[in-house]
Amino acid sequence: MDNGNDQQIDVGSVVEAVSAGHSFGAPLYVVESMCMRCGENGTTRFLLTLIPHFRKVLISAFECPHCGERNNEVQFAGEIQPRGCSYHLEVSAGDVKTFDRQVVKSESATIKIPELDFEIPPEAQSGSLSTVEGILSRAADELSALQEERRKVDPKTAEAIDQFLSKLRACAKAETSFTFILDDPAGNSFIENPHAPSLDPSLTIKFYERTPEQQATLGYLTNPSQTGQSERSLGTPSTQTTALPHGTIGATAGHRAIAQSNSTDISDNLFRYSAPEEVMTFPSTCGACTKLCETRMFVTKIPYFQEVIVMASTCDDCGYRNSELKPGGAIPEKGKKITLSVKNITDLSRDVIKSDTAGVKIPELDLELAGGTLGGMVTTVEGLVTQIRESLARVHGFTFGDSLEQSKINKWKEFGSRLTKLLSLEQEWTLILDDELANSFISPVTDDIKDDHQLTFEEYERSWEQNEELGLNDIDTSSADAAYESTEPTKSP
């Protein structure tokens, strides 16, 4: 980044340039700044760039010509993501290649190693672009920096830190197995998957909703009274009704079938696709800016599936929009695997309901996405494939980075072309939705689902580990059952 022709400018110009949102072709900004070690003036260089398929980042590098002090930092110039992310990387002893994985740690991320009971809080290390080895080595160096002074003041603490440093350095040299956890409520951190776009057996990615405490830590106002919208009446949740029915899955096909047949059974069955005219509207909080917004909700029944709750929120302040489909009724006792053989263009238009817990598999591409990767959505087969293509490009960053081997770049491009060919139906392929809670669905193209031979359903017993992850092993409904029984009217003799 050194350039003899660098022209120094003021900090205000840098802030204006970053706020403008330029990415590609952005110039290198040089600002005179004070060295925190010797107090003399050094130079800080800023570069706003876009990591392909990841985020906009602001890279800063400081250098002091007087004492030789150097440091660098990565800050995110883009928006905070709708959900937080948690990366779990299993590192085996002797697996040196894992330490070369690139890691983006934002200023809000926490790093943990449970085996050592070790945690690097957000304030301990600023945002950085490094590797697994680099982060562990940096943590070890920072802990050992003041060991000589500690031995003079508190020998016992210094000895305990020495013992811990030996364990930490053993992990950094791949001499022992451990788990590397990167948790970021802002959703802007990342661990490279060298096997992308295939599933990484050592890496688990989970997305979660932020808690009010995490929202406050990120700078959001969690108290509605602090949002400056006191003129809005909070009141009690109210319901409104609208006379306009909402379009739902299969409505057009339903009208066509009713017009062609007088069968009462077919009519009753297809009418289940129609949503009720009553739509409940109640005040809620925006998931992006935490200001007041409205959420609309209605309940409908999908044939051959179950009762579902449709919710849609819009925020007039920040423009955030969100739609969710939640399952209704009891938790199914078994999981369900849905397999669709895609053969023609009609199959691409099939309605698809994918829940948060559903995984997606396409065997012809050796593609497997764990549950939660794409979140819950209501779409079509074509829309699901499009979402997979866009999500893989966004989640698996550094795909076309300068340091990536050409063979891996060619591998990704080849996979992208193969994924695109699925929509052109050059060959038949298979779509599998595996949902532990059986809350996913692919619509049939026949009046009776049993007559659709391209669509199969398979129920299976959940394992203990799956129930544990879903929180079902320790669930206790005895108090609720007793309360319901006490409110049931007694039958007269």
Image (cartoon, rainbow, N blue to C red):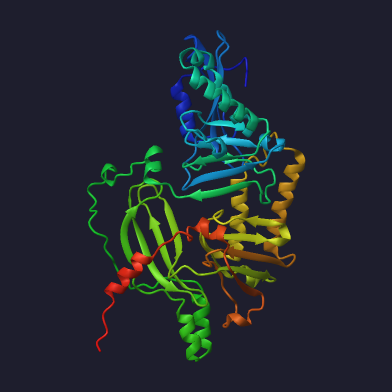
- The outermost residue toward the front is 156
x and y, in percent, of residue 412 in the image: 71, 47
Does 334 appear above or below 127?
below
Q: Who's the residue at 76% across and 39% down the image? A: 406
Q: Who's the residue at 49% across and 31% down the image? A: 18
x and y, in percent, of residue 47 in the image: 56, 27
In the rendered image, the quadrant that contains the N terminus is top right
Q: 73 and 210: which one is in front?
A: 210
Q: 271 and 431: which one is in front?
A: 431
Q: Quadrant of residue 409?
A: top right
Q: Quadrant of residue 5?
A: top right
Q: Is residue 477 left or right of residue 468?
A: left
Q: 358 and 445: which one is in front?
A: 358
In the rendered image, the quadrant that contains the C terminus is bottom left
Q: Is residue 377 visible?
A: yes
Does 452 appear above or below 217?
below
Q: Is residue 227 left or right of residue 402?
A: left
x and y, in percent, of residue 183 in the image: 51, 41
x and y, in percent, of residue 87 in the image: 56, 44
Q: 254 and 25: which one is in front?
A: 254
Q: Who's the residue at 57% across and 38% down the image? A: 115
Does 487 appear above or below 289?
below
